[in-house]
Image: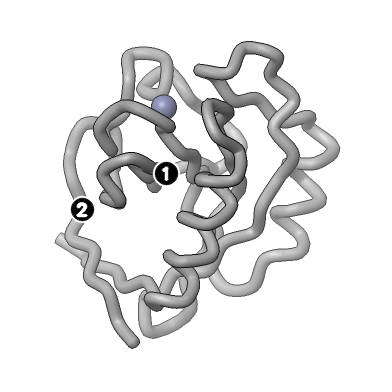
Amino acid sequence: MRSFTIARRELRRLQTRATRAKQHEVCGLFFADESHRISLIFVRNISSDPRRFAMTRTDFFAAKKQGSGTFLGIFHSHPSAPAKPSATDLQIRGGGVRYQLILDVRGRDVKLWRQRSMVPLSLVP
Ligand SMILES: [Zn+2]
């Protein structure tokens, strides 16, 4: 299976934003360059339910345009749950979303998923 990397700095940026959001989830789109290194584009979470996330179509497509490299999918944070897709997360379809990157804020753990399968992800400087 294909594997990906994420720079410590990029992961720290995600952890910081997610920590600041407290019980609210942060979300966005992520991309990979030709060496399979992941980059994130944050998108405003419009969900009023703190345990959910939602994006407007406009924001989604604007972020998709803004990112560089290959579009892989959506990332979001779990303020107090493991870095594993929930039943709701597994229903995400369309828009070219193939992968999901999930951050467990409390456990400072990040995992990459293709549906229910975990995809190898390693930290690089
Ligand atoms: Zn989730």
Earlier residue among tags 1 and 2? 1
Question: What amino acid is found at the position of numbered circle 1 in the picture?
Answer: Arg
Q: Position of residue 72 (x, y in %)?
A: 47, 54
Rendered image quadrant of residue 84: top left
Kindly identify the residue that appears in the image at 76 percent across and 60 percent down. 65
Residues marked 1 and 2 touching at CB (< 8 Å)? no
In the foreground, 31 or 14: 14
The local crowd at label 1, few if under 14, some if 14 to 19, many if 20 or more residues have their Cα within 10 Å, is some
Q: Position of residue 50 (x, y in %)?
A: 58, 18
Q: Is residue 23 left or right of residue 81?
A: right
Quickly name the residue at label 1: 98
Question: What amino acid is found at the position of numbered circle 2 in the picture?
Answer: Val
Q: Is residue 118 left or right of residue 98?
A: left
Q: In the rendered image of this protein, does residue 27 appear above or below residue 62? A: above
Q: Position of residue 92 (x, y in %)?
A: 48, 24
Q: In the rendered image of this protein, does residue 55 appear above or below residue 2? A: above
Rendered image quadrant of residue 3: bottom left
Q: Is residue 44 left or right of residue 68?
A: right
